[in-house]
Image (spheres, rainbow, N blue to C red):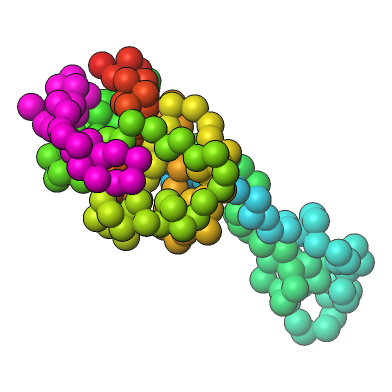
Amino acid sequence: MATALVRGAEGAETGSIELPEAVFGGDVNMSVLHQAVVRQLAGARQGTHDTKTRGEVSGGGRKPYRQKGTGRARQGSIRAPHWRGGGTVFGPTPRSHALAMPRKQRRLALRSALSAQAAAGTIQVTVDFDYAAPKTRQLATFLEQVGAGRRVLLVLSEHSENLELSARNIPQVKVVLASNLSVRDVLIADTMIFTEAALERVREHLG
């Protein structure tokens, strides 16, 4: 069974905890992980790309020259696709890039990502981030004390404005709710720190 270090408010090690086997001890399904990450990145695309067809480009209403007698190839509009400044054929239009994925697969992907991190030993647990006011230096000291990697994911059970403000000015530190965990955030994190309440929330959701 996977375990995680438990940290106190100052970052000192106070013990260890067994992580829920159903969530953090499963097999890592690379295929489902790939599908989930592609889906997340596709959903983040704006999809506002657009080109103008020959019917949308300005001008081109008049025939450029008469049909016969000029010795040149016949033309009907200066905005035909083969003209400079003409319309685009089969160009991109605004659309949604969102991809569908069944709920069971989404949960399997998240369990796989968490299991991979647990196996790598990157998960730690703290009682709570009880900040009375935003304290960036206090959080930076805590992360240094726990030996956090370059990319840190702090997982909470509920919003904490003081912690979010404290983390905002530290590069590569992200604060998320347990209910909003995403596969990509989990996979790219070098260190994940859960509060005890957040760990319980994840167990209830995925266990």
Q: Which one is in front, 92 or 67? A: 92
Query: Quick one: quadrant of the N terminus?
Result: top left
Q: Is residue 195 magenta?
A: no
Q: Is residue 75 visible?
A: no
Relative image position of residue 168 (x, y in whole percent): 53, 53
Q: Per the image, is 16 magenta? A: yes
- Please state the extent of the stretch shown in magenta in the rendering: 1-25
- Asked whether the viewer can see residue 20, the reply is yes
The residue located at (32%, 20%) in the rendering is 200
Q: Quick check: 134 above or below 89?
A: above
Percent position (x, y) of residue 159? 53, 31
Left or right side of 131 for 34: left
Query: Which residue sits at x=15%, y=33%?
Result: 16
**x then y, percent, for residue 5:** 18, 38
Q: Is residue 100 above or below residue 148?
A: above
- In the image, residue 39 sits, relative to residue 146, either above or below, namely above
Question: Which residue lies at the image location 32% right of the left edge and 27% below the top edge?
Answer: 196
Question: Which residue lies at the image location 53% right of the left edge and 59% below the top edge?
Answer: 169
Residue 25 location in percent, x, y? 13, 28
Q: Along the horizontal axis of the image, is 107 left or right of 39? A: left
Question: Total number of numbered labels?
Answer: 0
192, 83: nearer the viewer: 192
Name the quarter where the C terminus is drawn: top left
In the rendered image, the residue lying farthest to the right is: 62
Kindly give the residue lying farthest to the left in the view shown: 1
Q: Is residue 111 above or below residue 35?
A: above
Q: Quadrant of residue 193?
A: top left
Residue sitting nearer the eye, 139 or 184: 139
